[in-house]
Image: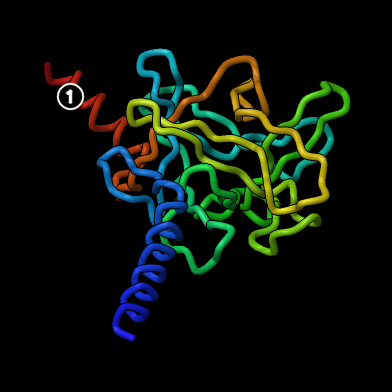
């Protein structure tokens, strides 16, 4: 009887360890801490010098005033708008690599009264998939297939944003890295790659950073 109980306990423990081992690794911020769902972070280029800054709201394109595109800041010093991540499993508090998630700006768009969740949109004129706002948060399935992204890595502390959703078993999806188009819009593939650091959002704003830097140069 004791041997049977020991054997059963061993099987349960082994099953638990196997399940735990199957979970993908957590995504780490630039400080080495696990990224948490619902916490504000900046997504900034990992290339210093000419790599550009963080992600932010862009201006409307063409005749449509909304939704707004997601773009990269021109200057390295500008971190853009903070974002939050929502894993496909709403009970999961940790953001994990290779796992479907929603990305959304934590602050409302400056002009559009719409959702600030990222989504994929196809531009027929350019034949290019761009990242826009006004997506749907949660509700994983075929109807929300364009709203799910993944984080892949790490590559020396940096990561890649990827579109390759697995929330729909019957959907024919494309899998590509999120890059930067020639006009700084985030797009699938894009005209250049976009490897990023994910940094905790600080209270210091972009304008304050620029003031501090200009003051430092003024008094040197």
- Give percent across and percent down for residue 93: 42, 63
Q: Is residue 219 left or right of residue 136?
A: left
> In the image shown, does 152 or 4 lie closer to the viewer?
4
Q: In the rendered view, would you say 3 is above or below 172? A: below
Count of labels in the image: 1
Q: Quadrant of residue 159?
A: top left
Where's residue 20, x and y in %?
Answer: 40, 58
Q: Is residue 84 above or below residue 215?
A: below
Label 1 sits on residue = 216
Q: Quadrant of the N terminus?
A: bottom left
Packing grade of label 1 (10 A; few <14, some 14-19, many >=20) is few
The front one of 43 and 195 is 195
Find numbered disc 1 in the image and state the secondary structure of the residue it sits on: helix
Q: Please name whichever residue, 80 or 11, is drawn nearer the observer in this view of the structure.
A: 11
* x and y percentages locating residue 29 in the rendered image: 33, 42
- Image quadrant containing the C terminus: top left
- Residue sitting at x 43%, y 64%: 15
In the figure, residue 44 lies in which quadrant?
A: top left
Q: Residue furthest bottom?
A: 1
Where is residue 157 shown, x and y percent of the image? 33, 31
Residue in the image at 69% along x and 60% along y:
140
Residue at coordinates 13% horizontally, 20% vertically from top-left? Answer: 219
Residue drawn at x 65%, y 37% as measured from the top left:
163
> Is 204 on the left-hand or right-hand side of 126?
left
Residue at the left extreme, as displayed: 220
Instruction: Please say which color scheme the image uses.
Output: rainbow
């Amino acid at each position: 009887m004791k041997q049977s109980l020991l054997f059963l306990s061993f099987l349960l423990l082994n099953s638990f360890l196997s399940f735990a081992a199957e979970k993908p690794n957590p995504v780490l911020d630039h400080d080495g801490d696990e990224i948490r769902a619902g916490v504000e972070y900046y997504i900034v280029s990992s290339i210093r010098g000419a790599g550009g800054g963080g992600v932010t709201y862009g201006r409307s394109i063409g005749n449509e005033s909304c939704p707004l595109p997601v773009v990269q800041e021109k200057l390295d010093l500008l971190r853009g708008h903070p974002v939050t991540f929502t894993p496909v499993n709403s009970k999961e508090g940790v953001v994990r690599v290779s796992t479907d998630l929603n990305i959304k700006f934590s602050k409302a768009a400056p002009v559009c009264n719409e959702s600030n969740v990222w989504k994929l949109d196809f531009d027929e004129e350019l034949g290019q998939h761009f990242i826009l706002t006004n997506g749907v948060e949660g509700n994983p399935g075929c109807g929300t297939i364009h709203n799910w992204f993944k984080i892949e890595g790490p590559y020396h502390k940096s990561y890649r944003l990827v579109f390759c959703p697995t929330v729909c078993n019957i959907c024919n999806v494309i899998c590509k890295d999120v890059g930067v188009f020639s006009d700084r819009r985030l797009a699938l593939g894009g005209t250049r790659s976009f490897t990023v650091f994910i940094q905790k959002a600080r209270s210091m704003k972009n304008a304050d950073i620029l003031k501090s830097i200009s003051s430092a140069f003024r008094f040197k």
